Each structure stands twice: as C-alpha cells, then as structure tokens.
Amino acid sequence: MAKTDKAGKSSAKSWFDGLKAEFKKIIWPDRKSLVKQTGAVVAVSIVLGMIIALMDFIFQYGIDILVNISF
C-alpha cells in the first residue's frame, strides 16, 4: 500500500510539472489584440441576441395569429 501512495504522489507531481510546462508555452495576447477581440465578441453577441429576439417576436406573432383564427 505504501508503494501506491508513493506512486500516486509522484504521478501527481509529474502531472503538475507537465501542467506548469504547458502554461509556459502559452503565448498571451497583447493589450491591443485583447481589446479588439473582446470588442468583436461583444458585438457579435449583441447582434446574435437581436436576431434571436426578432425571430422570437416573429414566431410569437405568427402563433398568436394562428391561435386566434376563428372558423
């Protein structure tokens, strides 16, 4: 059982060492690039939100018309 604990600790340590090495490989964006990308994400989110709201309004209006048709 002692071997399992020791192996578990060493594998966890090597996992964290590997994680640390991978984080060193990350190339973080500069401020200008980050601001530009954030603006693009916000703009696309707003446009998609407006499209979804418009479609929701159209479908709701269409269903209300269909429900209120009297024969």
Image (cartoon, rainbow, N blue to C red):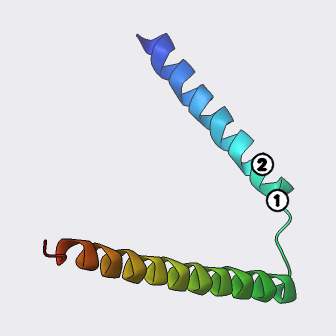
Percent x, y of residue 68: 17, 78
Residue in the picture at 13% in, 71% down: 71
In the image, 13: left or right of 66? right
The three-letter amino acid code for the residue at tag 2 is: Glu
Q: Are marks 2 and 1 in contact (CB under 8 Å)?
A: yes
Left or right, residue 10 beside residue 29: left
Q: Quadrant of residue 27?
A: bottom right
Q: Which residue is mark 2?
A: 22
Residue 62, by quadrant, is bottom left
Q: Going by the picture, which residue comes out furthest to the left?
A: 71
Which quadrant is the N terminus positioned in? top left
Q: Position of residue 6 (x, y in %)?
A: 53, 21
Identify the residue shown where x is 56% and y is 19%. 7
Question: x, y (%) of residue 21?
Answer: 79, 47
Please tell me which residue lies in front, 44 or 6: 44
**Residue 33 sits above or below residue 12 on the image:** below
22 above or below 42? above
Quadrant position of residue 19: top right
User: Where does label 1 land, which residue?
Assistant: 26
